[in-house]
Amino acid sequence: MAAGGSVEVIGVHGSGKTHFITQVVTHFRNLTWHVIEVRGLYAYRNTPFASLALAGLSSVAQGRPGSPRVVVSELEELLASPRSLLVLEDAEFIDDASWGALSAVCSVLHTPTVLSRLPGSSRNRIGNQLEGMSIAPGFGVHLGPLGFDDLSEALTQATGTPLHSSAMSHVFASSGGNVGLAITMVRAAIYEDRLQLEHGRWATSDSFWSNALIPYIDALLAELSDEQWDALEILSLLGVVDIDTLMEFTGPEVPTQLEELSLIGFFPSAGRLLVTVQPPLLVDFFRHRPAAARRHRLSAKLEAHLRSGTEASVQFRLPAMSQSPDAPFVRLVHEHLRNRLLVAQTEWSRSPSRETLANLIEVSVASGATAEELEALFADVALLSEHESEQMLVRWEFLRADHWLFITGEFQRAIDSLRAAAGRFPRLGALFGVRIFEIERAVFPAADSSLLPDPEDPALDAQVRAATHMAIGSELLRGGRVVEAKAHYDDANKLEPFTGEIDRMGFLIVTDYFAGYCERARRSAEQGLAEAKDSFDNVAIRGYCYLLALLDLHDGRVRRAEESIQLAFSLGEPIRQPPFVHLSFLVMGTVLAVGQGNLDAARALQAVYEHSAVPDSLLPGGSRSWATARVIAAEQSPGAGADHAEQGGTELWERGAHLNAALVYLTALEFDLSEERLERLRPRLAAVHSPYVTDRVRYVTAVLREDLGDMEQMAAVFTELGQFGDALGAYRECIRLAKLREDSAATDRGESRLRELRESLAPGEYGERRLRSGGVQFSAREIQIAGLAIAGKSNQGIADELVLSVRTVESHMHRIMKKAQVERRQDLGFVEELSGARSPRLG
């Protein structure tokens, strides 16, 4: 440019055009160049000479029209110096009259020019005007999305603080690398306190969507036609689809127009061209728009386009709607699943292949297809050629085996089919041994470890090595060697990076939690659920609901655990995917119901899981004895519950499920903490290499030995780890022992710490976990009154609401507080049996 050249800067909204031009202008002004800046504005694009008037030209100031000759003469004077620079920002919105004057001057003076515009306008008016201006010589600069590292550096400069890697990954994925959008997202999250500083980095587990981003999205979509808007919204709801499928809905022109505007992106897959929305945050924008009628119209329009001439092989079965606050969201998930099924049926009908058939089967399973419907789809493979890639053929064999495993329950048939197919695949054949090992480990008492290849063998395909590391890690996790399992998951991640798939992330999150990385596990689970909700992925939503419910139950966060289970069930039953999740929800729901004193609901859930043919899950949360022991403790006695838990733990131990056995053994000690039982279980508990288990063994040992110092230390450890249910119970034990010893200083210290902890937690959110208790049973009326008391109502207010006398309420409150063993009514919210009193109950 200093030598007389010109530059055209092209980029979408937020790509950095303004920042780039500002740097150029500052550079030349520092060199004492004369700079004339002309900016186009959308509102004035049809007003003659508006752009030049705003640039300060006196010949068109104060609304006077001015003659073209006068305007051109003034421009020639302003740009007469050889050290002049013309800046045209947002050139597509410069009005025609201003363009004419600029063209007339630049075609004579050849003034160095820097021009910015949106992509997609070069074939129209802008291109013609540039030709008339005779800008030459010159070159173009296309500002595309930034890479991960560059975007991270830009955000650090913009906010002054780096982002945690998980938060940065989420910003990068949602913004698509658009630096302006990314900065806006982060600043909005900081302003709304959804980002918190942790160890000098911004961290969050929330979604980055905010209403503060609506003006940015509005600017991005400002000039879309109705047809373009419809296409973009339906694509946001569907996710990734074949370009031919999109064109059936929109016609051939609209995708071309959206591509020119950089609002959609393409990537090839197995001979097909797939299309998705850019930037991905648009999906959040359309999801959060309160436009139910519009979305219903689009779904009907999509169905009308795609149904014509296509016979549906699987009918979409809309589950009954719940009456929960999640109902509108659940309806969106169902609509999204229905649309995915429709698209998959269309693509299979138009382009039959193993890939399109496998896609249709996977969506059909998620949509609730019957076993007969799925068998009919599998039979269609006979019509297809065997000439497919090895990757595709392996995927097909695994899909068929999963059908026999999880739909028809033919475990041995699945194993036999995998064993028979293994020899056909030279590169990926070892995957079949890994899969057989995983099935045997889940279904049978023992698995043949010789089926697993050496994951360190460099001759093996990276996919095989990663799968082997995952299988070994899962076996180590099951065997209670949690820290060693984490190392194998890390190795698998290096070979094949985890990208949020729930089946792999589930093992990683559980391992993190029981290895002592509790906050990282919670953050990963919360972020995973947020992303699953954003994409309306019903399988991932259920999987992450399981993980959050599991972590929350062990933290004592009973209210949120119940909400997660209710959301998963509200999506419809049966829950086929992820595997074992349905059983785990039944087990954890039973544990919650017992804890809330709702034995009728607990027995109903227990009856369902006892009649299920699915074996106990390899992961925590799906062990029947964990829940059944709690039912027995509540119905009979804590000692009877402890005996059942110990027996169940022993059966799990003999199956090799050492981590699950240890957790059930801890339940036995919770109900019946005796020296005899602890010493009987200690060798097996010590063999489980998990900080979670080690901490609790140390705590119950301290309680038995009445070691107040160690008890206080463990209460502090539980608090630090965020396991507040155990922390509340531990401080209560410390106070009990201090009072027994008449140690007033220790009593005051314990009461102060317990009060501080309770005041830092929301009432009713966490339940105190008590030793030697099978649970306190409250009547329905007591639970109702306690819930109102937790909500802050006085005795008079409770009496008015329930139409009772104040004396009756006082009598109930006295009995409730005596049962709960609390002295202040505000502490009722931390009693596990009452912690959910203000929220809907399971069952």
Image (cartoon, rainbow, N blue to C red):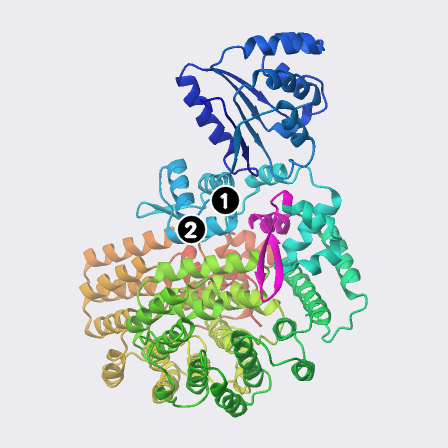
> Where residue 504 appears, x then y in whole percent?
44, 69
Q: Residue at x 44, y 27 (%)?
A: 23
**On the image, numbered disc 1 is attached to which residue?**
145
State the extent of the magenta-drawn residues as a range. 260-289
The kind of residue on which mark 2 rests is: Ala
- Circle nearer the viewer, 1 or 2: 1
Q: Which mark is residue 628?
A: none
> Where residue 155 appears, x then y in whole percent?
41, 41
Q: Is residue 17 left or right of residue 308?
A: left
Is residue 286 a member of the stretch shown in magenta? Answer: yes
**Residue 766: which quarter of the image?**
bottom left
The kind of residue on which mark 1 rests is: Pro
Q: Which mark is residue 167?
A: 2
**Residue 484: which quarter of the image?**
bottom left
Q: Is residue 526 left or right of residue 309?
A: left
- In the image, 253 versus 200, the foreground residue is 253
- Which secondary structure lies at badge 1? loop
Q: Residue at x 68, y 16 (%)?
A: 49
- In the image, 660 versus 625, the foreground residue is 660
What is the total number of numbered labels drawn onto the structure image?
2
Q: Residue at x 33, y 81 (%)?
A: 658
